[in-house]
Amino acid sequence: MAKLTINESAGGGYTHKYAFDYVDLQRSGFLSASSTKAVGTFAPGDIIDLATLYVVTAATGNTDATLGFGTSTSTPIELLSSTAALGNTAAGVPIYNTGSEFVTNAKMSVVNATTASKTLHFQVAGTISAQTAGSWILAWRQMSPPRV
């Protein structure tokens, strides 16, 4: 009898997550010089069909901080492009699939249709030095094709 794969038996949950808070964002070296943080790998043939930023604790001290998430090294917004998500979103509010691949290109999922792995990054913009509270979880569901 055939067995369910992990992706089939997961029932729709997230496969990857990255938690961070305002102290992380302000810590020297946490973000690169371009205000990005590498958080995962997107292998050839992999599929991402859900990308979410969950606000655990609302930020205080500023309202202009934004987060983008995707594969671009300069402006990663393919999976999430959130206006003021890090500074102006209430706790408990998820922001999901707002990136250009989902919205502009009207896709239900994003596939790495290349032969090279891509790095998944998030990028923060805005006045993070003024934040005095805030914590978030970046989560996504990534599936891999069968490998030989």
Image (cartoon, helix red, strand yellow):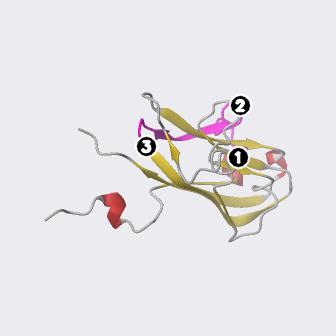
Q: Residue at x 47, y 39 (%)?
A: 41
User: Is 90 on the left-hand or right-hand side of 130?
Assistant: left
Which one is in front, 137 or 96?
96
Q: Is residue 38 above or below residue 55?
A: above
Q: Residue at x 65, y 45 (%)?
A: 105
Q: Position of residue 79 (x, y in %)?
A: 62, 47
The crowd level at tag 3 (other Cα within 10 Å; few <14, some 14-19, many 20+) is: some
> Mark 2 is on which residue type?
Ser
Q: Position of residue 120 (x, y in %)?
A: 55, 40
Q: Of marks 2 and 3, which one's residue comes earlier in the chain?
A: 2
Q: Of marks 1 and 3, which one's residue comes earlier in the chain?
A: 3
User: In the figure, residue 4 lies in which quadrant?
Assistant: bottom left
Q: Position of residue 28 (x, y in %)?
A: 69, 37
Q: Which mark is residue 34?
A: 2
Q: Which residue is mark 1?
A: 104
Separation of marks 2 and 3 at Cα, in angstroms: 26 Å
Q: Quadrant of the N terminus?
A: bottom left
* Residue range of the region highlighted in magenta in the rendering: 26-46
The crowd level at tag 1 (other Cα within 10 Å; few <14, some 14-19, many 20+) is: few
User: Is 51 on the left-hand or right-hand side of 28?
Assistant: left
